[in-house]
Image: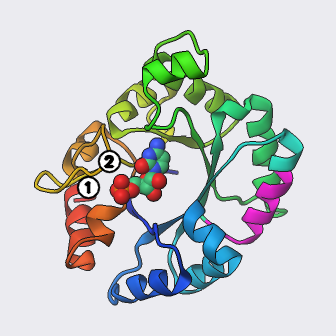
């Protein structure tokens, strides 16, 4: 089910900026991530437009609500014909099962469904103090990944440095989608637990999500192709 690929995080605040960025890619159609910023700014229309241009789409809206609401919302997202969606594993196994039901189309097909375990911006200390989770962050991530697997989901979003641990617990076929990727000679910015595309490949993650190293590059197409060369090979 999994196929190694580079997903570009299109963290822009308008359809115009996003489409101008994608216009630069004249000889390839990268897998694109649409997050909350762009979706809230440009709505379903930008999803349809990018899909019509032939890109695969990861709709990163991180749903977290009661099972019935998530199920119905996932049915709406599924009709947009995206390739990957996500939710928070913290919503419980029941919520994740409901999401899967909502996402599955009448013909039995559906986008990949991926769970966020603990956000990479959450430290172990904050998780224990603010969320009152009395366990290590690694144990929590593995536990949430196993819950996602039990609910029938395809994989999790995690740091590339956690992908090996998740694969060990859930099996090689359980998909890992990993942001926090930087070129060895690039700027880290606000990301903390980062690794290079080449190292992410060695660890065995399935998809890397890369934003600023591509979107802010002087030549975004060259930066994207460098990522693909290092990660997909
Ligand atoms: O610019 P950069 O490469 O840091 O972008 C990473 C993308 O992955 C952003 O869209 C960010 O919101 C997303 N992300 C993340 N860490 C997570 C989940 C999503 O960086 N745990």
- For residue 190, the mark is 2
Q: Residue furthest right?
A: 68
Percent x, y of residue 127: 52, 22
Q: Is residue 38 above or below residue 115?
A: below
Percent x, y of residue 226: 19, 66
Percent x, y of residue 222: 20, 76
Q: Quadrant of the C terminus?
A: bottom left
Query: Which residues, given as a range, are shown in magenta?
Result: 71-82
Q: Is residue 169 above or below residue 189?
A: above
Apparent side of residue 64 relative to residue 189 in the rendered image (left or right) = right
Apparent side of residue 229 relative to residue 141 in the rendered image (left or right) = left
Q: Is mark 2 within 8 Å of ligand 1?
A: yes
Q: Residue furthest top?
A: 134
Q: Is residue 73 magenta?
A: yes
Instruction: Provide the secondary structure element on which disc 2 rests.
Output: loop
Q: In this rendering, which labeled residue sits more in front, label 2 or label 1?
A: 2
- For residue 231, the mark is 1
Occupied quadrant, residue 209: bottom left
196, 97: nearer the viewer:
196
- At horizontal 71% and vertical 72% (from top left) the residue drawn is 80
Q: Is residue 233 above or below residue 99?
A: below
What's the magenta bit mostly, secondary-structure-wise?
helix
46, 51: nearer the viewer:
46
Residue 54 visible within the image: yes
Residue 209 visible within the image: no
How far apart are the two marked residues, 2 and 1, measured between alpha carbons?
22 Å
Crowding at dot 2, Cα within 10 Å, few <14 / some 14-19 / many 20+, comes out as: few
């Amino acid at each position: 089910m999994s196929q190694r690929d580079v997903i570009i995080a299109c963290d822009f605040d308008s359809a115009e900026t996003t489409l101008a960025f994608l216009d630069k890619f004249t000889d390839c159609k990268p897998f694109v991530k649409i997050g909350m910023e762009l979706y809230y700014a440009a709505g379903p229309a930008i999803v349809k437009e990018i899909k019509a241009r032939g890109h695969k789409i990861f709709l990163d809206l991180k749903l977290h609500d009661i099972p019935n609401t998530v199920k119905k919302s996932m049915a709406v997202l599924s009709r947009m014909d995206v390739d990957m969606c996500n939710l928070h594993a913290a919503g419980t196994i029941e919520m994740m099962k409901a999401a899967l039901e909502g996402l599955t189309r009448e013909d039995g097909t559906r986008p990949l469904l991926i769970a966020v375990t603990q956000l990479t911006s959450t430290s172990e200390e904050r998780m224990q103090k603010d969320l009152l989770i009395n366990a290590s962050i690694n144990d929590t991530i593995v536990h949430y990944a196993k819950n996602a697997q039990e609910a029938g989901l395809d994989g999790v979003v995690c740091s590339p440095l956690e992908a090996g641990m998740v694969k060990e617990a859930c099996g090689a076929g359980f998909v890992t989608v990993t942001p926090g990727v930087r070129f060895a000679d690039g700027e880290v910015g606000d990301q903390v637990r980062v690794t290079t595309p080449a190292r992410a490949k060695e660890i065995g993650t399935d998809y890397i999500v890369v934003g600023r190293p591509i979107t802010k590059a002087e030549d975004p197409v060259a930066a994207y192709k460098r990522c693909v060369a290092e990660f997909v090979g």
